[in-house]
């Protein structure tokens, strides 16, 4: 299946290629071609050629999740103990590996589709266990929709992550919700209720009792709510 990548994601894949080359003792050219092949293209050059940043009408292309099952397995591993330990702990080192995607999503639907693909890939890993010292834990807290936060009085909401920052934002700096119009959507009370997790206020997709990183069961139930949210965005 074809994917479209933003410039930021292309740079992320380059970094993955550098890590792959170093780990396997192969040249950078071989590594970036292997990354391209994992995404459905025979070479890196061909992959870039077939991924314009805008469609024929000039509209920005949706940002696509692109990670192989093996890459997801790797992201679930605990990071190596940082050289700066104990000043910098493993969990902080893991968080530093997570890319900020908050400016990449072109619509709330795009952000939810990305989350659905992410969770679908994660659930393919047998007996997955998410550690706070793994990149996946911090990706899930940053990249996945947690709450539809009101921004105006006319039923306009923004998708935010577990830290109440725009979906995709990694740091916890103050964020101006108005600057993230691409994550805004209009919902009625009934629609927000349709994807709300039981036991929470309206608009929450999970709570501290059932975060998707807690267990496979929680992850499966969260994915179901993502699909309902995706449908609600079409209404």
Image (tube, grey):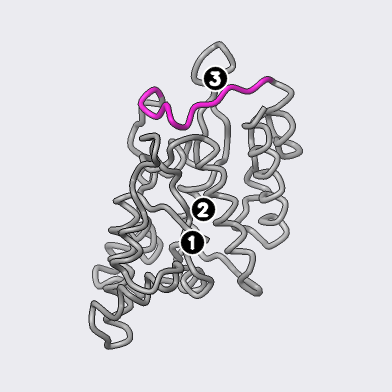
The Cα atoms of the two marked residues, 1 and 3, are separated by 30 Å
Quarter of the rendering containing residue 25: bottom left
Q: Which residue is tagged 2? A: 140
Q: Which residue is tagged 1? A: 136
Q: Which residues are magenta?
A: 178-188
Count the marks: 3
User: Closer to us: mark 3 or mark 2?
Assistant: 3
Which residue is pictured at 54% across the width and 24% down the height? 157
Say the numbered circle drawn on residue 156: 3
Residue 120, image x and y in percent?
Answer: 62, 59
Q: Is residue 182 above or below residue 186?
A: below
Q: Nearer the viewer, residue 184 or 45?
A: 45
Disc 1 + disc 2, Cβ < 8 Å: yes
Q: Nearer the viewer, residue 181 or 162?
A: 181
The Cα atoms of the two marked residues, 1 and 2, are separated by 6 Å
The first of marks 3 and 2 along the sequence is: 2
Left or right: where does residue 203 sit relative to residue 157? Answer: right
The Cα atoms of the two marked residues, 3 and 2, are separated by 24 Å
């Amino acid at each position: 299946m074809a994917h479209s990548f933003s410039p930021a994601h292309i740079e992320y894949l380059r970094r993955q290629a550098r890590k792959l080359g170093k780990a396997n003792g192969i040249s950078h050219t071989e590594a970036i071609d292997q990354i391209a092949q994992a995404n459905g293209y025979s070479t890196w050059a061909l992959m870039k050629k077939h991924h314009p940043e805008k469609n024929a009408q000039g509209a920005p292309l949706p940002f696509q999740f692109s990670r192989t099952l093996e890459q997801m397995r790797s992201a679930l591993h605990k990071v190596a103990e940082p050289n700066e330990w104990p000043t910098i702990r493993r969990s902080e080192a893991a968080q530093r590996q997570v890319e900020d995607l908050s400016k990449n999503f072109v619509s709330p639907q795009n952000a939810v589709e990305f989350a659905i693909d992410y969770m679908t890939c994660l659930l393919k890993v047998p007996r997955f266990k998410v550690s706070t010292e793994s990149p996946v834990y911090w990706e899930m807290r940053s990249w996945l929709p947690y709450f539809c936060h009101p921004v105006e009085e006319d039923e306009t909401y923004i998708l935010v992550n577990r830290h109440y920052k725009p979906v995709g934002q990694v740091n916890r700096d103050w964020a101006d919700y108005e600057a993230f119009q691409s994550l805004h959507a209009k919902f009625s009370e009934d629609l927000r209720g349709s994807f709300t997790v039981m036991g929470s206020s309206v608009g929450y997709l999970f709570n501290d009792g059932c975060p998707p990183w807690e267990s496979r069961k929680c992850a499966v139930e969260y994915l179901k709510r993502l699909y309902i949210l995706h449908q609600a965005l079409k209404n």
